[in-house]
Image (cartoon, rainbow, N blue to C red):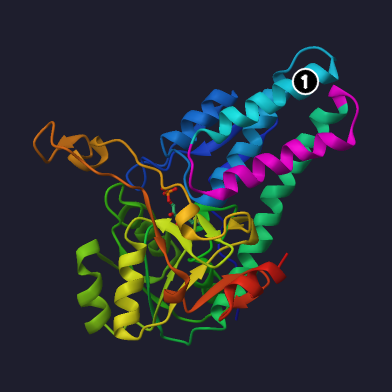
Amino acid sequence: MTKAVEPIRSVEWKNNHVKLLDQRLLPQQTVFLTLTTIQDIWDAIFELKVRGAPAIGISAAYGLCLWSQAFEGDDFQTYLTSLQEQATYLESARPTAVNLFWAIRRVVNVTKSVSSVTEAKQLILNEAKLIQEEDEAVCKAIGEYGLTLFNEGDTLLTHCNAGGIATARYGTALAPFYLAKEQGISLNAFACETRPVLQGARLTAWELQNLGVNVTLITDNMAAHTMKSKGINAVIVGADRIAANGDTANKIGTFGIALIAKALNIPFYVAAPLSTIDLDTTSGSEIEIEERHADEIRTINGQQISPKDIQVYNPAFDITPSEYITGIITEKGVIKGNYIEKLAKLF
Ligand code: MRU
């Protein structure tokens, strides 16, 4: 018997505003924000109120819609020049997840086929809604392909949160769990807490528990021991940017888990939509790694845990070289082997 699982919508367009789930407050508080300006969207992305590559892209697309709707006048050239400026502004919110740049480009590109402000306003909104609709279908397909790799009763380890709230629905790395639930298949999970911002402890643990998955939370430094001793069948993570050769940027800590997986002969899968694959980036060394504020490490929940002014290094992502990746699960199937050739063929 199949059972549809109630979707969690982290981003929604509501006529003249964006309704956004404040992911910083989960799981203690479920607060939806009302965002009315493109600046609100920039702040939400920068401050991680919305996070996760596809959700960032969807939010940015709606950010341009908020600006577009507020644009006064009918001078199309002024509109286009200003749109480009707003796009560049939004792109500065975070550097690593390519979905941000991908979604903004899609929205800006639709204006090439129109000649008036009124038409552009409508088309931009249609495109942003389409990006969100497509992402839901894409994530579902990722879940279906992902599920072909696992068996009833398997235990998967995941890092960070690549769940429903990081996308339009279903997530990427968590999509197989949603699809498994719908199909009555049982999968178990171990979730790494994911310091410093705790996406694993706060978001993945919460999401999978809500879904009714048997999920166990561990701290990041427990990954190797857990993978060796707890019968982990596979690792599955999301991605923020996949280079043309398969090198993958994902939440800091992912590379370490990939190394452990290789040493222990555990399959290591990356689940991501085509919108996360960046063929313009040849290899992982070209991907900009975001560095975030030192206080994310010096404090937990606003509480100082280190000397106040201690020097800190806080990269938000790392690169897993493609040779550590058993397969990349996309909406077009599972890619294995020659990533350069096979990723290019997807487009
Ligand atoms: O800093 P975050 O929380 O935006 O980082 C998120 C991740 O690293 C996710 O794994 C990735 O964006 C995929 S979300 C489907």
Say which quadrant the C terminus sits in: bottom right
| Residue 268, image quadrant | bottom left
SS label for mark 1: helix
For label 1, the residue is 79
Residue 93 shown left or right of residue 244 in the figure: left
Residue 103 lies within the magenta run: yes
Chain part drawn in magenta: 94-118
Q: Position of residue 9 (x, y in %)?
A: 56, 48
Residue 197 lies within the magenta run: no
Residue 46 visible within the image:
yes
Q: Position of residue 48 (x, y in %)?
A: 42, 39
* Nearer to me, 321 or 332: 321
| Residue 22, image quadrant | top left
Residue for point 35% across, 60% down = 205
Say which quadrant the N terminus sits in: bottom right
Residue type at the position of mark 1: Tyr
Circle 1 packing at 10 Å, graded few (<14), some (14-19), many (20+), is many
